[in-house]
């Protein structure tokens, strides 16, 4: 009896400790959400209160009346463009790396891993020159090109692990059944790795969605800004309103959360496979 | 037809014959097809990664005109200027403080939380999702929220600390030279410690239950079970996590650029931010490339060190 | 091409399969497979058996066309096929882990090969139904592989292979993922099925029991070479060398190393604690002359009689295992350890001292240096 009692106490102690910690960690997020619904007078009130008196929607109205949708669309276009290119290339590449054998294959895989670890900042100056020379400064192409530098190695590496998890024998069975390489790829392999391709696409989308560095250097006009740049610039303005900034923060986070909710069951193993099991 | 030409054509034929024989083997044919599939990726790699990277390395030896973008070879001139001044060394020192300080906090916090979240308690699944939330947040959101929390005028943190009496008047966490680096490290830790949690938790869940059962049967206490089973099992994931986080924090541009922009008075000016400022604040692309080259050398040393360190580990397994 | 509307399933006119000087090298050094000749008759069920890494799976993959041989040729019914890609050879294969298409229903799995060969839809449906009935999977045609039990998955894999009535059917350890009871049952089922379908069948296994019970003939392989190719009975009774003798049969054959003197008509075998005159009749064949040679005497456990009074070799019982219908008796003697098989009611205790009597006519002799049998079986 006392053993069971001890275990019960232990479980409750752990529950309290864990939840206190989780609350502390999520406090900034709670505060962000609450602040976005506070009126300008309430937000600067002393002492501040956790929850707004009334649900004030003025921040969101002001945000959506401004450049928000323009920036939002820019972010969507750049991230989607990057994902499409990177997934097409990455799928072909991963299939090649995992299903054939030819000299230099291992070296290629290692090279991908290395570029995956290389810092974006190092690419900044040369990319700038290339973008100027290609005369694509301040266009979507500039940002897609720049985002590919991190999205491509990441996707290729992740896709490679998905392709590796599809047993080779299923493909061999299809070949014995008379399927050509082409048919094998489209009818047998692709349907099986489709969940992996979708997850990889979502991860790559989020990475590109999150880019601040490249977007801040390679866009020069207000109408080409992406969301992160737009928000960061607004935050530095002297008359920036914190309520609107918090509303913007919430609005940028929501798409990411929706995508992650979509992935949630797969999230833990994927982050491990892609990032840690290198 | 002269003798030389004849022999060339014979050799050419022989080469063609070899090629035909090579092509006749089905195994070789599939290998060629496979390699061709990789071609677009390789081309894209050269265009957007290898090419620019090589170009960046070379650029460190040139001076770039601001408007015309004309380049002039200056040998080691850029490097002499960078290494001769104090800015680079200062930035390197700050980068190391930022990286190591953040790393220690992330690892301690990450491992602790992973162990906690691996226990049985009520609402565990939800708690796990919430705990990794900061890592999912767009970086611009994370920094904006913290700027608001630590705002000297209306920030909740200053208000709370003054209420409790820990400080007498609000503090500019990001504008005090003595505090800025610490504040930045704190924000960065909050944002990325979930990565460590995810990595460690994933491994913890894969440790076979039988190991603990066997140890318990052998009379091992909870503490020695942790020491003799959990830690050794975590070893490899710990090493790789430290390695990855070190590299990523060493190269972290976004957090600092968005929170302080390197200020106040260069108090948080790390190497990545320095590269950006030299290149796009002062329009000295050659100098920026030289600093990037030096960073690349430091990283390469780190890579070599890592692989040299983990080689024997791999053999053990 | 006449469509098969018969309710019973169409028969394959299986073709003769011949491997000719087939060599496979993965890197420099010893080849992984080196087969001078292997001729499998049309419709025959042949098993390639051997320890893991002996090259049996590689051989099978070369027959399928999934692996290119380094040298040599493979003939299906007289026509060379090495230059034909896997898609164009008329083979079917059942993989060890079944390798079903996980995203397709059972019916789609079955008909995929027919589809790829341009068989019209109406005929495909007829054939799918016929195969499914034959394998008793007609109730699960709309399910997906992951909703099936291991045994059901295996039957789908079999169905997928035989639906095309291939010239050659290849089975790569198809029973190894089943539990013991189902495996015994499927052994018989598989043989029945093969008789019905009639295609030339190559079966790969490391389990000598499967090889013995299922095959028309067995090819025992080691280090990429065929050690012996014969009927199960001949392989068991007249193993060509020490390896085959030790590999086939469980518990394995007892070996006693010694010397032989005399020759022609018989010899005297001497080992520690044992002196035995072995005549031609004693070893079921003609002993090749081998005066003073190092030889190894082999005797199967069921041919070791135990006697309290007298016999060929004195021994002490160390362990007795009751298997059910019989007992395995582990013995220690001056000539080494031996195993004897006796009936279940033999009263034996560890520590009992007794004599082993080797059944005359069942003794086998091997040259200790070449490891080859030094008995020619009487024709």
Image: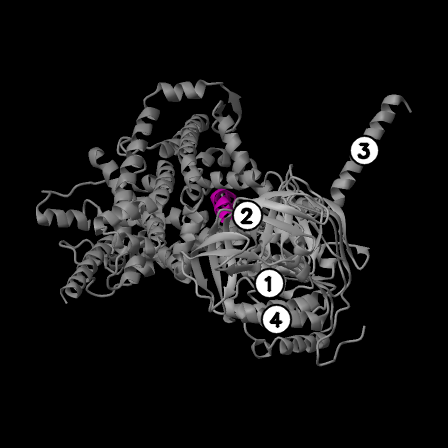
Given this view, does label 4 or label 2 mark the residue nearer the observer?
2
Distance from the alpha carbon under mark 1 to that under mark 2:
35 Å
Residue B241 % position (x, y):
36, 43
Locate residue A179 relative to residue B263 in the image: left or right: right
Do the residues at discs 1 and 2 belong to one chain?
yes
Q: Nearer the viewer, residue A250 or B292?
A: B292
- The residue carrying pointer 1 sits among few (fewer than 14), some (14 to 19) or many (20 or more) residues within 10 Å by Cα, namely many
Q: Which residues are magenta?
A: A142-157
**Label 1 with label 2: CB-CB less than 8 Å:** no
Residue B148 x, y percent position in the rendering: 25, 49
Q: Residues within 10 Å of mark 2 (few under 14, many from 20)?
A: some
Q: Main secondary structure of the magenta part?
A: helix
In the rendered view, does A262 fall on the left or right side of B87?
Answer: right
Q: Nearer the viewer, residue A131 or B312?
A: B312
Secondary structure category for the residue under label 4? helix
Nearer to us in this view, A169 or A115: A169
Mark positioned earlier in the residue sequence (4 or 2): 4
The answer to which of marks 4 and 1 sits earlier in the sequence is: 4
Q: Chain of mark 1?
A: C
Label 2 sits on residue: C274
Chain ID, mark 3: B
Element at badge 1? helix
State the mark number for residue C188: 4
Upstream in sequence: badge 1 or badge 2: 1
Are the numbered discs 3 and 2 placed on the same chain, yes or no? Answer: no
Label 4 – label 2 distance at C-alpha: 43 Å
How far apart marks 4 and 3 lie (CA) works out to 57 Å
């Amino acid at each position: 009896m006392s053993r069971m009692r001890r275990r019960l106490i232990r479980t409750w102690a752990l529950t309290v400790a864990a939840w206190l910690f989780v609350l502390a960690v999520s406090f900034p997020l709670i505060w962000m959400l609450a602040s976005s619904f506070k009126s300008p007078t309430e937000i600067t009130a002393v002492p501040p209160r956790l929850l707004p008196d009334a649900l004030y929607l003025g921040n969101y109205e002001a945000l959506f009346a401004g450049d928000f949708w323009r920036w939002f669309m820019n972010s969507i276009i750049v991230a989607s463009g990057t994902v499409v290119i990177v997934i097409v290339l990455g799928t072909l590449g991963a299939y090649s790396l995992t299903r054939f054998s030819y000299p230099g294959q291992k070296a290629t895989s290692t090279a991908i891993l290395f570029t995956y670890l290389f810092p974006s900042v190092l690419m900044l100056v040369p990319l700038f020159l290339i973008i100027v020379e290609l005369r694509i400064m301040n266009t979507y192409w500039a940002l897609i090109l720049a985002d590919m530098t991190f999205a491509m190695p990441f996707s290729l590496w992740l896709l490679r692990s998905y392709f590796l998890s599809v047993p080779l024998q299923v493909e061999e069975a299809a070949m014995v059944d008379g399927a050509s390489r082409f048919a094998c790829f489209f009818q047998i392999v692709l349907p099986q790795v489709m969940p992996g391709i979708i997850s990889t696409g979502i991860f790559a989308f989020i990475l590109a969605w999150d880019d601040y560095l490249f977007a801040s250097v390679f866009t020069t006009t207000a109408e080409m800004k992406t969301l992160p740049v737009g928000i960061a610039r607004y935050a530095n303005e002297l008359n920036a309103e914190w309520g609107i900034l918090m509303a913007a923060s919430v609005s940028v986070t929501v798409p990411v959360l929706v995508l992650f909710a979509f992935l949630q069951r797969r999230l833990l193993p994927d982050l491990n496979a892609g990032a840690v099991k290198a | 037809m002269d003798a030389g030409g004849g022999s060339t054509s014979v050799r050419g034929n022989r080469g063609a014959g070899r090629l035909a024989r090579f092509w006749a083997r089905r195994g070789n044919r599939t290998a060629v097809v496979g390699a061709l599939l990789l071609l677009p990726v390789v081309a894209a790699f050269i265009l957007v990664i290898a090419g620019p990277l090589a170009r960046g390395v070379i650029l460190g030896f040139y001076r770039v005109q601001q408007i015309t973008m004309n380049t002039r070879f200056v040998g080691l001139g850029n490097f002499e200027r960078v290494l001769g001044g104090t800015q680079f060394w200062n930035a390197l020192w700050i980068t190391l403080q930022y990286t190591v300080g953040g790393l220690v906090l992330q690892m301690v916090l990450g491992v602790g939380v992973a162990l906690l979240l691996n226990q049985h308690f009520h609402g565990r699944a939800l708690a796990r999702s919430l705990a990794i939330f900061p890592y999912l947040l767009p970086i611009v959101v994370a920094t904006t929220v913290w700027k608001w929390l630590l705002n000297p005028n209306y920030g909740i943190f200053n208000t709370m600390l003054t209420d409790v009496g820990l400080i007498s008047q609000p503090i500019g966490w990001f504008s005090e030279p003595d505090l800025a680096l610490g504040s930045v490290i704190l924000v960065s830790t909050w944002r990325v410690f979930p990565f460590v949690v995810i990595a460690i938790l994933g491994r913890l869940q894969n440790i076979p239950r039988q190991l603990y059962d066997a140890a318990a049967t052998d009379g091992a206490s909870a503490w020695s079970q942790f020491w003799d089973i959990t830690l050794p099992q975590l070893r490899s994931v710990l090493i790789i996590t430290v390695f990855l986080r070190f590299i990523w924090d060493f190269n972290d541009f976004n957090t600092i650029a968005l929170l302080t922009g390197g200020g106040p008075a260069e108090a948080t000016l790390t190497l990545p931010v320095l590269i950006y400022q030299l290149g796009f604040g002062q329009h000295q692309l050659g100098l920026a490339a030289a600093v990037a080259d030096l960073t690349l050398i430091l990283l390469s040393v780190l890579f070599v060190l890592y692989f040299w360190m983990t080689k024997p580990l791999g053999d053990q397994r | 091409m006449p469509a098969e509307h018969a309710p019973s399933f169409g028969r394959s006119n299986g073709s003769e399969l011949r491997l000719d000087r087939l060599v496979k090298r993965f890197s420099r050094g010893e080849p992984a497979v080196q087969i001078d000749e292997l001729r499998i008759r049309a419709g025959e069920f042949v098993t390639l058996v051997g320890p893991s890494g002996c090259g049996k799976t590689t051989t099978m993959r070369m027959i399928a066309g999934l692996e290119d041989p380094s040298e040599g040729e493979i003939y299906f019914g007289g026509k060379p096929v090495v230059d034909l890609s896997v898609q164009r050879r008329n083979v079917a294969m059942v993989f060890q882990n079944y390798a079903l298409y996980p995203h397709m229903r059972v019916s789609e799995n079955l008909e995929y090969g027919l589809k790829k060969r341009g068989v019209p839809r109406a005929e495909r449906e007829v054939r799918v139904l016929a195969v499914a009935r034959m394998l008793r999977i007609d109730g699960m045609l709309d399910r997906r592989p992951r909703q099936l039990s291991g045994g059901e998955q295996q039957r789908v894999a079999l169905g997928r292979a035989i639906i095309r009535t291939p010239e050659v059917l290849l089975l790569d350890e198809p029973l190894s993922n089943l539990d013991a009871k189902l495996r015994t049952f499927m052994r018989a089922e598989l043989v029945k099925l093969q008789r019905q379908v009639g295609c030339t069948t190559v079966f790969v296994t490391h389990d000598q029991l499967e090889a013995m019970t299922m095959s028309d003939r067995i090819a025992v392989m080691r280090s990429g070479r065929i050690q012996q190719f014969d009927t199960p009975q001949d392989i068991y009774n007249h193993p060509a060398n020490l390896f085959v003798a030790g590999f086939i049969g469980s518990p394995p054959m007892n070996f006693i190393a010694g010397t032989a003197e005399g020759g022609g008509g018989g010899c005297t075998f001497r080992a520690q604690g044992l002196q035995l005159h072995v005549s031609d009749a004693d070893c079921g064949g003609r002993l090749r002359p081998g005066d003073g040679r190092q030889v190894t005497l082999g005797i199967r456990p069921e041919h070791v009689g135990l006697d309290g009074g007298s016999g060929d070799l004195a021994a002490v019982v160390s362990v007795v295992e009751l298997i059910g219908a019989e007992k395995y008796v582990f013995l220690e003697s001056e000539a080494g350890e031996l195993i004897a098989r006796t009936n279940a009611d033999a009263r034996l205790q560890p520590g009992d001292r007794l004599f082993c009597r080797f059944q005359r006519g069942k003794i086998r002799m091997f040259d200790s240096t070449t490891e080859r049998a030094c008995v020619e079986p009487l024709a």
